[in-house]
Image: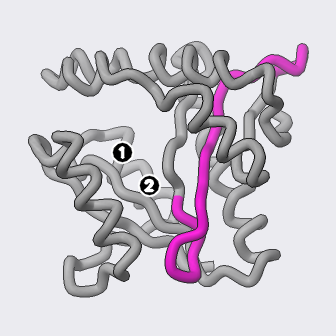
Amino acid sequence: MRIRPALVDELPLLQDIERAAGQCFRDLGMPEIADDEPLPVDELARYQRSGLAWVAVDGSDHPVAYLLAEPVDGGLHIEQVSVHPDSARRGVGRSLLDHAAARAAADGRSALTLTTFSQVPWNAPYYARCGFQPLPEEALTPGLRAIRRQEAAHGLDRWPRICMRRPL
């Protein structure tokens, strides 16, 4: 699986990948997550222009997964990782995370951070296997606190969520 920067004309494909990946939440009794619309193309374009949107592509150079990130408080915050179900359980998500970690380290960042559902098997337990550790509430930086407030305003706190950090 090759990882490369996302291209502008691929941004609608990223939305399709996220919609497909989100369907598995329906089976966990989280239909609101499954039905939540992906970021709009103009917002995806902001990540793409900043060089912090990567895709994993198949042998035909077609995106099957993507990762969005942004600098937050000296780290690189993983905003979104989505893998199309047809490509799941093949190490694609881990490869994207490792790519982001290498980029963050090269840029002098201290860690990767993310927020996630603590009780969803392919969320917090998966990220722990990828080297992320839960951050206690008192250890959250101002930027991570702001992200958590935005998530709460979006209704994501209906289910237990945590912040996690992977030192680089």
Q: Quadrant of residue 138?
A: bottom left
* Quadrant of the rendered image containing residue 63: top right
**In the displayed structure, does residue 166 sit left or right of residue 154?**
right
Comparing 29 with 144, the one in front is: 144
Instruction: Farthest residue to the front: give it.
Output: 42
Tell me the chief SS of the magenta region: strand
Q: Is residue 136 magenta?
A: no
Give SS at disc 2. Answer: helix
Which color scheme is applied?
one colour
Report which residue position mark 2 lands on.
127
Callout count: 2
Give 154 or 90, whichever is nearer the viewer.
154
Callouts 1 and 2 close, C-beta under 8 Å: yes
Q: Residue at x 18, y 25 (%)?
A: 30
Tell me which segment is drawn in magenta: 58-77
Q: Which residue is mark 1?
A: 123
The structure residue drawn at horizontal position 27% and vertical position 27%, both measured from the top left corner, is 33
